[in-house]
Image (tube, grey):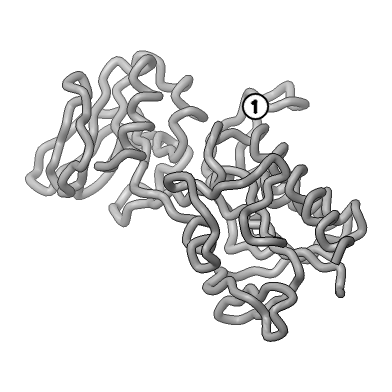
Amino acid sequence: MEKKIIVIGSGPAGISAALYARRSGAEVTVVTKGAGALAKAERIENYYGFAEPLSGAELERQGIAGAKKLGVIFQEGEVMQLGFNDTFDGYQVSGPSFELSAPSVILAAGASRQSLRVPGIAEFEGKGVSYCAICDAFFYRQKRVAVIGSGEYALHEAEVLAPHAAELHILTNGAETDVAFPQEMLLHKQKIAAVEGENHVERIVFEDGSLLPLDGIFLAIGTAGSVALAKKMGILLDGQNIRVDDNMATNVPGIFAAGDCTGGLLQVAKAVYDGARAGLAASKFIRGK
């Protein structure tokens, strides 16, 4: 049996898993579809080893460079399918332009933070548009902020922001809410036309022409990521998170998960720890094959 491991995702969890698996002697391939949630973080000031703030994109770049230096292989492209290989002694990971096979797979593609196709959203990422309340709430103390979303994820992000913000708005972008937002969270159901500002977010423009002055916007439109792939394999979930044991193993032998897709604290430190455990456990699994 080939000593191969496929890691899906190149964020902190995926790269940490790849590093530990590679150092354990495995041939490791990381499948990446490009920059993830970490790259959209404007500043990181609470991570061990960095006295000065650095961008999420830079931390991600350094992590990937370290993995490549150890000989980790990177395959670019979006994973479309995860299933058993032809001999049923391992797994096949495939996308539009690639097909890989290995006896072990680590799911580390994160909990998808969906974006919004509205003018200004992409332009102001890192300049007032954020995807992680627990990461960036500190920077919006006593400021006017909004959460775009209408479900449980939006409520969760809003609850994280509530102790910090001077004003907290919920923007459903025309969607009906399926959760009860507290009265102090100001609800707006109009469709969003644009996000505007000079060098930073300054306001939302609704389709009816009305304006909402803001300092920051947090997107919380559903979740997906590794969970969709897990469902294809019959992997057990806890709500919308992948269920794992203490070694980050799922209920399907040889498939592990790490990082945001397993729930808990959505922070780099936790993702790196998860990845280390998953990488070591996957290496031990393939040695026993």
Residue shown at 40% from the left, 24% from the top: 160
- In which quadrant will I find the C terminus? bottom right
Q: Is residue 59 visible?
A: no
Say whether residue 135 is visible.
yes
Query: Residue 100: horizontal and vertical position, in percent?
Result: 70, 76
Q: Quick one: which residue is furthest to the bottom in this view?
A: 86
Above/below status of 251 relative to 54: below
**What residue is drawn where x is 28% and y is 42%?**
151
Residue drawn at 65 percent across, 43 percent down: 245
What type is the residue that disc 1 sits on? Pro
Residue 56 lies left or right of residue 87; in this view the side is: left
| Residue 131 lies in quadrant | top left
Q: Examine the image and state in which quarter residue 137 appears.
A: top left
Residue at 18 percent across and 26 percent down: it is 186
Point out the residue furthest to the left here.
Answer: 208
Q: Position of residue 140 (x, y in %)?
A: 41, 21
Residue on which disc 1 sits? 53
